Image (cartoon, helix red, strand yellow):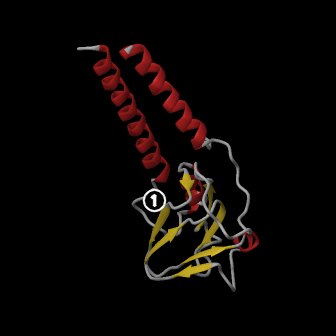
Amino acid sequence: MDSTMKITTNASFVLFLTLLVFLLQLLLVQSSADFEVGDDKGWVVPDSKNGDKYNQWASKNRFQINDTIRFEYKKDSVLVVTDSEYEKCRSTHPIFFSNNGDTIYKFERSGLFYFISGVAGHCERGQKMIIKVLENETPQPSGNTTDTPSDHSGAVNPIIQISSSYFIVVFISIFLFA
C-alpha cells in the first residue's frame, strides 16, 4: 500500500469516527424520558406513614425539558399550581388541570413544578409533589422571558463536550494510524 492510499484511508477513518461521535452526541442531547408518577401504585393518597412519598419519588429522578410524567388515578385529579397554592393545598385558578384518570404532562421549561390533587383532603394527606426540571445540555430557543432560572449544577456544556470528544478521536487516530 503506498503512502497516499494510507493517508486517504486514515483521513476517511478519522472523518468517520468524528461523524459517529458527533451523531451520538446529538442523540444523547436530544433524548427525553417518560416517568410514571408513583411507579406501580399511581397517583393515590399515600398511607399515613409515607406522607412525603411523591417528593421522595421525585428526588430519585432527574427531570429535563421535554421529559413527560404520567399520572394514573381513579376519581381524582392533577393540578399544577404556584408554590403558595402548593403550601395551602388549594387553587382556584391552577396553571394546569386534568381529571381524566390518565394524565400526561410535558415539561417545556426548566424550573420548579408544583403538583397537587384537586380532591378535598388528598393534598393535606400527602398527595402532592414538587419536581425540579433541569436545563437541557443544549440551549432551547425561547421567546418567553418569564422562564425561571434554574440550577446549572450537573449540566455539561455540549460544545465543550463535543469539542473534547472530537479532540480525543483525532488524537487517538493520529497515534494509531500514523
Q: Residue at x 57, y 62 (%)?
A: 48
> Compared to 178, does 167 lie above or below?
below
- Considering depth in this image, is 12 or 149 the residue closer to the camera? 12
Above-or-below relation of 117 to 40:
below
Where residue 94 appears, x then y in whole percent?
Answer: 65, 81
Dot 1: element: strand
Q: Residue at x 69, y 74 (%)?
A: 89
Residue 83 position by quadrant: bottom right
Q: Is residue 83 above or below residue 35?
A: below
Pick the residue in front: 127 or 3: 3
Determine which quarter of the picture holds residue 12: top left
How far across and down, in percent of the image, does residue 151 sit?
A: 70, 49
Relative placement, left or right, of 21 versus 129 is: left
Which amino acid type corresponds to the residue marked 1 in the rendered image?
Answer: Phe
Find disc 1 in the rendering and name its residue: 35
| Relative image position of residue 51 (x, y in whole percent) | 60, 60
**Quadrant occupied by the C terminus:** top left
Q: Residue at x 71, y 65 (%)?
A: 147
